[in-house]
Amino acid sequence: MLCREMAELRPGTINKVNAPHPVRSRPRSGPLQPAELAHASVMAALCAVIAIVAVVVPFAAGVALLGTVPTALIAFRYRLRALFATTVAAGMIAFLIAGMGGFIGVFHSAYVGGLVEIGRASCRERV
């Protein structure tokens, strides 16, 4: 009897009730949500540390490529406003500790992260 009931259920149903339309999990406009801001600040700190290490440690310039990962994650998961907040926070930290080289490293990482967001948005429009 249980197998017969399970066979009647289709994907997308919970107890044989369908949702009339999907509900957005987060708004795409307006101020940053607390979760977006918290995630942006943590990723900004990580990006700043990577940029500072790439500038301060000799022969570690290749580490700067890893700085694109946190900004790309922010851009892919949230919106450009969160990426901008990440860039400003990481840029301030890197500039205060490592100077203009650290700021430029953060800016390059944010640029690649912005390209990830643009690519994701264009793929969403095609579907």
Image: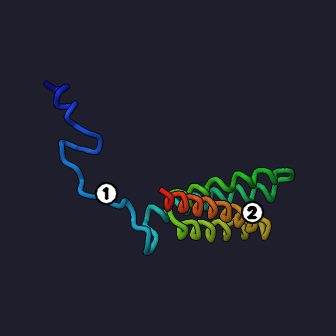
In percent of width and height, residue 57 lies at: 82, 53
Callout 1 crowding tier (Cα within 10 Å): few <14, some 14–19, many ≥20: few
Image check: 15 left or right of 57? left
Going 59% across and 70% down the picture, which residue do you hit? 84
Element marked by disc 1 = loop
Which residue lies under the disc numbered 1? Answer: 22
**Residue situated in front as seen by the camera: 60 or 24:** 24
Callout 2 crowding tier (Cα within 10 Å): few <14, some 14–19, many ≥20: many
Going 57% across and 62% down the picture, which residue do you hit? 117
User: Could one spot residue 42 in this view of the protein?
Assistant: no
Quadrant hosting residue 100: bottom right
Check the image and name the residue furthest to the left: 1
In percent of width and height, residue 56 lies at: 81, 58
Check the image and name the residue furthest to the bottom: 30
**Residue situated in front as seen by the camera: 14 or 89:** 14
Element marked by disc 2 = helix
